[in-house]
Image (cartoon, rainbow, N blue to C red):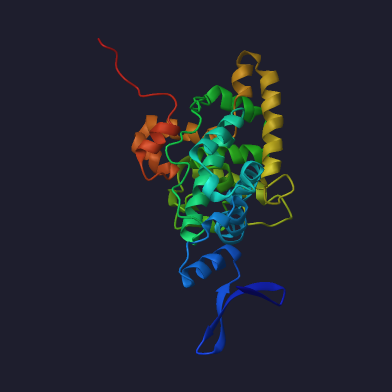
Amino acid sequence: MRKRVFGGRTYYYLRSTVDGKRKEIPLGQDFILALRQYADLNVIDAPHRGATFSDVQKKYVTDAVPKLASSTARMYASDIKHLMTSFKDAPLDQIKPMNIRMFLDDHADKPTTANRCKRLFSTMWNQARGWGYTDLPNPCEGIRGHALAKRTVYITDAMYAAVYAQASAPLRDAMDLAYLTGQRPADTLRMTEHDIIDGHLIVTQAKTQQPLRIILAGKLAELVERIRARKATHRIVTGALLTNANGKRLTAPVLRNHFDAARKAAAKAAPAIKDAIEGFHFYDLRAKAADDTSDLRGDQAASDLLGHDSVKTTQRHYLRRGKIVDSTK
């Protein structure tokens, strides 16, 4: 096998002689895949033993990560660093299920991150099988991640009002929009005037690409008019529904800073519910929207608002108050 460098890129070839003439068969740029093609063409055992996790990581970052949503790509970049610390030079044929278990145990202090890294490792391994880096079974199969406690915090109206009273105008708009639409913070920040079409607020969820048409009526319609009135006082013109104090699009860091400040002030102003307020996260508004919608119109309506394909997903992860039932007598 020979390599050639053209324009700063390396290409691999199989040198062969056919009928007394030299011939070079192109094997591509990827060294591991070139080895496998070399093995196939020479009828020898496939050289998957030479591939390491680092080889898979390089190809995954180059070929797969750019196709992901930006938020997912950022999260994967962080998780890959953890995986590389443990598996960087490990040959794929030496990674066993016990190694996955050891990784989980070593990161038991951060169970959510550990579980997420395990899922990413499994995804990368399956990709590696498709690319021809290995034919071995996925070592994550049969290995259970850490058991995580279900978040049970429900944001009561009193908690909401306490933080709302201390909130800036941009934060109030954001809280109301997130609650009334039941959408994730990132999707809420992306909403624009252009998403309002034929009496609906059109949402395409970044995480799942789930499309929704939320009817623009009632309190949501009133909120949009309030937002427009506040935006009209600024010289800066933007299509974003959520804007900062200067009229520019509201960003996630600014939203976080405003919310943290309001929560801190609310905890001080309402000592009777101080602990509950301190446990209030902005993303809990999605669960509050689910619970309140379920109480008014049922679990299916809550699931539809959140954009879930199955009502069971809503019931398992977002309905935190339990069913309303009658007593025995």
Q: Position of residue 296 (x, y in %)?
A: 38, 32
Q: Position of residue 207 (x, y in %)?
A: 51, 49
Q: Residue visible at 56% across and 68% down?
A: 34
Q: Residue visible at 66% across and 56% down?
A: 238
Q: Nearer the viewer, residue 103 or 322?
A: 103
Q: Left or right? Give the position of 163 relative to 317.
A: right
Query: Quick one: which residue is furthest to the top in this view?
Result: 329
Quarter that holds the N terminus: bottom right
Q: Left or right? Give the position of 93 relative to 261.
A: left
Quarter that holds the C terminus: top left
Can residue 194 be seen from the camera position used here? yes
Q: Nearer the viewer, residue 97 or 200?
A: 97
Q: Nearer the viewer, residue 46 or 69?
A: 46
Query: Quick one: which residue is furthest to the left in this view?
Result: 329
Image mark count: 0
Query: Quick one: which residue is furthest to the bottom in this view?
Result: 20
Q: Position of residue 84 (x, y in %)?
A: 64, 46
Q: Position of residue 236 (x, y in %)?
A: 72, 56
Can residue 318 be seen from the camera position used here? no
Q: Nearer the viewer, residue 37 or 199?
A: 37
Q: Quadrant of residue 294?
A: top left
